[in-house]
């Protein structure tokens, strides 16, 4: 047992003692300063001992642990206390009071070499979620972490820091996923993804769905369609009880961005899918619950109806991840949304899916980048794709095709980097594509490569439909598969490899994963080669 802070079993009652108290385990000037702060907090713990026994919790770590947004010297640790995770009010059966939660991070799984520890306050106002930004870590290193409160100890999670800035001679196995509808199937794909032991996991949105239980569901989704903060909190809690999802979170740090269903289908900035006078209140509730349940940094803490989610993360000198928010700032979908032929509005130069500010931030980041690989982590299909076989054309107004000028400017920006890569979710199918300067000319310059991951469960088992008509009409699209799964990538200084992992079924648990196809992109090449 490496937890050595006094006060086990005690309860805090003073919410003014909030914030992280972080204590390095090797002496330093900083540790002396922080040690004083810790002592202050722990004195308060001791003073409230009398109230401890009245509210003794059963195991509050039912939602697992997670880590995220790894820097070279820092990572976010997350948990959320819930002794009854499916309580109707979304508050996990927790008493209406704050609890101190101790955390520690070690270089070994047995927690014999703890390098930092501290205390964080879990408040009812934040659904007893805990976000710790641990600093002072070593670059390119593996760590283990866990939490303790009220005599209960959480499962241990594994995390890692990014390599030191500028380091290129390193490699990274990264898996990415999207679209995990709880009712549509079992989360076996998360388990298979975890078994690949990636160093980093990206989730590109539709982490959860707002809908009430559906007639075709294989698992019972609790509660009505999510609109209230209580509903969104309960939905997140139900998802987090899934052991395969917990395993994936505990395996590696996550880098998350949302798509539409964390709030509601196909919302666009302040415009809901269907007219709804209470949409801004709904959006605010969705953002609050999303923040509470994800391993995000303080910079993402919501402010009313706003939340700063787009951000950049450097993986040494190997990769710059530019994580985009394509929902919060977008213009409403052109031509009434859906897949449309002959929609000239989609070509308007001012139409934007990123919003002006995010576009400027992204193009600036691409221009300044010295990374070997510049990777967009984002939601909707980026390259042009005509989805209507035959002479007619059909473009998806919810995807970048509905915001063509905005897309083409960013594609040009990617084309000026050393290696531009786009990662995509949303469409519940695997696809591979080359982003081109001119889609009517298959020999035109490649600007980037795009890897579109299928869903974890959304859409159910899928089938072997080859979608040959679409592939024939879009020669820059190289692969398609309608099965559930995820994409496993390996980045090195010389190449990027992507394995399209699929499961034969998800409506029953336990399917094995296989690789349906693999592609390699060589340094400075910008084209897909079957591996
Ligand atoms: Fe989805």
Image (cartoon, helix red, strand yellow):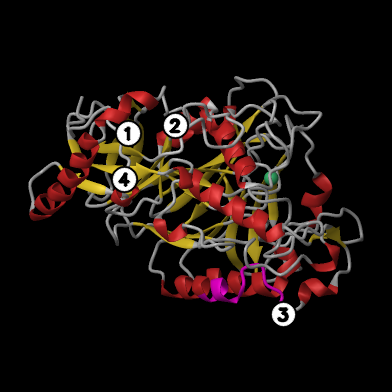
Q: Sequence-wise, which precedes: disc 3 or disc 2?
A: 2
Q: Which residue is mark 1?
A: 147
Viewer-side residue, 147 vs 491: 147
Q: Which residue is mark 4?
A: 14
Q: Sequence-wise, which precedes: disc 3 or disc 4?
A: 4
Task: Give the secondary structure at mark 3.
Answer: loop
Left or right of 473, for residue 315: left
Closer mark to the observer between disc 4 and disc 2: 4
Q: Which residue is mark 2?
A: 64
Q: Which mark is residue 190?
A: none
Left or right of 196, for residue 352: right
Task: Measure the alpha-carbon separation of dots 3 and 4.
Answer: 54 Å
Task: Measure the alpha-carbon separation of dots 4 and 2.
Answer: 26 Å
Q: Quadrant of ligand 1?
A: top right
Viewer-side residue, 434 vs 41: 41
Q: Sequence-wise, which precedes: disc 3 or disc 1?
A: 1
Q: Sequence-wise, which precedes: disc 4 or disc 2?
A: 4
Task: Measure the alpha-carbon separation of dots 3 and 2.
Answer: 46 Å
Q: Which residue is mark 3?
A: 349
Percent position of residue 312, x then y: 44, 62
Q: Which residues are magenta?
A: 351-360
Q: Are marks 1 and 4 in contact (CB under 8 Å)?
A: no
- Is residue 170 visible to us here? no
Task: Measure the alpha-carbon separation of dots 1 and 4.
Answer: 20 Å
Picture quadrant where residue 164 is located: bottom left
Left or right of 220, for residue 104: left
Q: How many marks?
A: 4
Which image quarter is the N terminus in? top left
Which image quarter is the C terminus in? top right
């Amino acid at each position: 047992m490496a937890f050595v802070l006094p006060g086990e079993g005690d309860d805090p009652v003073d919410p003014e003692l909030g914030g992280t108290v972080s204590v390095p385990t090797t002496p330093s000037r900083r540790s002396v300063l922080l040690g004083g702060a810790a002592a202050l907090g722990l004195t308060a713990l001791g003073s409230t001992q009398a109230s401890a026994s009245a509210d003794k919790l059963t195991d509050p770590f039912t939602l697992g642990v997670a880590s995220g947004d790894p820097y070279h010297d820092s990572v976010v640790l997350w948990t959320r206390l819930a002794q009854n995770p499916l309580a109707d009010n979304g508050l996990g059966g927790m008493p209406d009071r704050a609890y101190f939660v101790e955390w520690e991070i070690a270089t070994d799984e047995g927690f014999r070499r703890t390098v930092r520890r501290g205390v964080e306050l879990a408040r009812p106002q934040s659904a007893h979620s805990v976000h710790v930004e641990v600093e002072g870590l070593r670059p390119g290193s593996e760590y283990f972490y866990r939490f303790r409160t009220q005599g209960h100890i959480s499962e241990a999670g594994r995390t890692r820091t990014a390599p030191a800035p500028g380091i290129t001679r390193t490699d990274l196995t990264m898996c990415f996923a999207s679209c995990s509808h709880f009712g549509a199937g079992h989360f076996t794909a998360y388990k298979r993804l975890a078994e690949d032991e990636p160093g980093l996991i990206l989730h590109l949105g539709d982490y959860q769905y707002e809908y009430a239980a559906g007639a075709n569901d294989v698992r019972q989704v609790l509660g009505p369609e999510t609109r209230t903060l209580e509903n969104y909190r309960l939905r997140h809690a139900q998802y987090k009880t899934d052991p395969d999802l917990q395993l994936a979170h505990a395996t590696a740090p996550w880098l998350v961005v949302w798509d539409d269903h964390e709030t509601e289908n196909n919302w666009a900035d302040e415009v809901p899918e269907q007219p709804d006078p209470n949409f801004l209140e709904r959006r605010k509730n969705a953002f609050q619950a999303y923040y509470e349940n994800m391993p995000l940094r303080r910079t993402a803490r919501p402010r009313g109806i706003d939340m700063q989610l787009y951000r950049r993360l450097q993986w040494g000198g190997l990769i710059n991840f530019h994580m985009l928010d394509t929902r919060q700032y977008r213009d409403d979908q052109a031509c009434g949304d859906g897949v449309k032929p002959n929609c000239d509005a989609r070509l308007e130069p001012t139409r934007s899916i990123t919003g002006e500010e995010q576009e400027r931030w992204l193009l600036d980041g691409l221009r300044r980048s010295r990374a070997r690989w510049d990777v967009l982590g984002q939601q909707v299909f980026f390259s042009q794709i005509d989805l209507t076989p035959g002479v007619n054309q059909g473009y998806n107004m919810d995807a970048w095709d509905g915001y063509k000028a905005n897309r083409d400017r960013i594609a040009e920006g990617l084309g000026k980097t050393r290696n531009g890569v786009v990662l995509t979710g949303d469409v519940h199918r695997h696809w591979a594509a080359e982003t081109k300067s001119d889609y009517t000319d298959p020999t035109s310059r490649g600007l980037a490569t795009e890897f579109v991951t299928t869903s974890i469960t959304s859409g159910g088992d899928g089938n072997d439909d080859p979608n040959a008509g679409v592939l024939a009409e879009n020669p820059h699209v190289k692969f398609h598969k309608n099965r559930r799964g995820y994409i496993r990538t390996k980045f090195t200084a010389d190449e990027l490899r992507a394995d399209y992992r699929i499961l034969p079924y998800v409506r029953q648990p336990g399917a094995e994963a296989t690789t349906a196809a693999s592609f390699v992109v060589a340094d400075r090449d910008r084209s897909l080669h079957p591996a």
